[in-house]
Amino acid sequence: MNYRKIYFLLIAAASVLTMASCSKKLDRLPNNGIYADSVYNTLGGYKQSLAKVYAAFALTGSNGPGTTDLAGIDAGLSDFVRMYWNVQELASDEAVCAWITDANGAILELNTMNWSANDAILTGLYNRCFYQITVANSFIRSATPDAVAKNGITGANADEIKHYVAEARFLRAYQYWVLMDLFGNPPFVTENDAIGSFLPKQISRDSLFTYVESELKAIEPDLIDARANEYGRADKGADWALLARLYLNAEVYTGTARYADAAMYAKKVIDAGYQLKSNYKDLFLADNNVNNPEVILSVNYDALRTQNYGGTTFIVNSSINSDMVPSSFGVPAGGWGGNRAKPTLPNLFGNLSDSTDTRAMFFGDIKDVTAMNQFTDGLRVTKFKNINSDGSTPPDAGVFCSTDFPLFRLGEVYLEYAEALLRTGDATRALTAFNAVRERAYGNTSGNLTTLTLDDIMDERGRELYWEGYRRTDLIRFGKYTAGNYLWQWKGGVKDGTAVASYLQLYPIPSTDMVSNTNLIQNPGY
């Protein structure tokens, strides 16, 4: 089985899918010839089109690096993983970027939690999410039972297409979860909406929660069993993992806690046969697709065939500079010198020189970030590399990376399970799940705790999941994001940190969409 096949099916297509201006209406049906009726005459054609839904996560455009599907958006601001990483990590206690004049100042705004509705990174991510929703909607419309039958596909092939539809609906639900988590109350459109010029209505955050929840439950029977699908494709395990994450944050989204439900779905994942990979560092290397029983769903990259200045190419290159010998990270032509840790991140590991926690992967001697624009201020994070687990470099290494990015993995689920159990009063089972993650980190029981608090879990999530795009969401759930009860360097634009307004727990709907769609009401405070 070719583990990257799902991405390459569509990359070979002759031309890129485009859409009308992202900042106007949600009439963003891809109109390229690849979506002509003839594509859907065979099972292979349907799979090729499903591949585009997945490929939209890994590529900015089908014509190679520097191109984008998003009209009016710079390619560098249109990659999903890169923009999502920025809004989750820079706007938290984990990361700071030196490129403070880039993206029209958007990076400085995220560094200091001083963004506006004109932020270019927020706009790029928002539009990418809706592009991916649009591509999913297009596929789902073309794969209804009536459409499949009309195309002459029956029997086992028609049943297989039901699995494809469930996957597309999962990817759409994931994007709506991202929008709900970041923007709260976005516009809403599905495959049932008319194609053409229309202004979609806004959906409330709690209603969107209900929609995502209902979609994930509805598609479960049609998804392939956990761990039985091709690598990089959604299955029941991914469905349960997203439900666990959704319920863990339900109190933030709806005002009603759902921790028992979070524990239930996390347990379903744990019981599905996934295992913690024995060496933590191997989760973030170029061959992390091989013998990896921990990753539930990833965005897949290949340095030759999914070239893009986002994704793990961005994460690896932005975290190192020429002084760090880029070839030792598998990018001999790379090293951009941008992102490094705020002191609060390495401080989670205590004295680094004495730490036996294998997750502590840092470079440098200066923890303090006195100057945001100085890459040497702050420890560099060396977690992601474009190196194989045997120490070799992938063929034709230059700038682009083959390291896959995990969207869901078992380490996260164990900590979700521990948190949900602790919040519902089951401290004994919570501690067992919590220590399972620490035993992998230390290689034995020397790091195990005997009692457990919510602060322990928040800190452990920082140690286990740093640089993976979780931190902003976690800080909000733990009540430590905007208030003055927890500070980090440059929070609120002050060197030692200061409290910021509570409305910053939601990002603004980009001004381009506010102008174009009169149905939208801006989030409070913007």
Image (cartoon, rainbow, N blue to C red):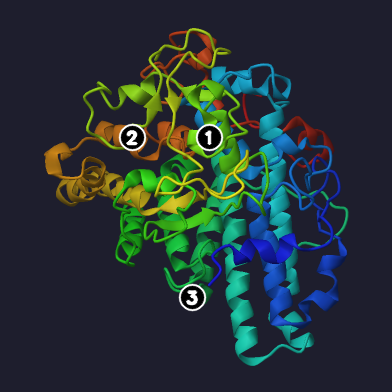
**Residue 505 visible in the snapshot:** no
Q: Quadrant of residue 519?
A: top right
Callout 2: few (<14), some (14-19), or many (20+) C-alpha neighbours within 10 Å? many
- Whether residue 499 sits left or right of residue 457 in the image: it is right
Q: Position of residue 59 (x, y in %)?
A: 68, 49
Residue flagged by tag 1: what amino acid is it? Ser
- Disc 3 vs disc 1: Cβ atoms closer than 8 Å? no
Task: Residue under label 2, please give it.
Answer: 463
Residue flagged by tag 3: what amino acid is it? Pro
> Going 64% across and 32% down the picture, which residue do you hit?
523
How far is disc 2 from disc 3 in space, using C-alphas?
35 Å
SS under mark 3? helix
Which callout, 2 or 1, points at the residue further toward the start of the chain? 1
Label ID, residue 327: 1
Callout 3: few (<14), some (14-19), or many (20+) C-alpha neighbours within 10 Å? few
How far is disc 3 from disc 1 in space, using C-alphas?
46 Å
- Whether residue 76 sits left or right of residue 167 in the image: it is right
Seen from the viewer's position, the closer of residues 201 and 389 is 389
Which callout, 2 or 3, points at the residue further toward the start of the chain? 3
Residue flagged by tag 2: what amino acid is it? Arg
Label ID, residue 417: none
Tell us which disc is closer to us: 3 or 1. Answer: 1
Which callout, 3 or 1, points at the residue further toward the start of the chain? 3
Label ID, residue 221: 3
SS under mark 1? helix
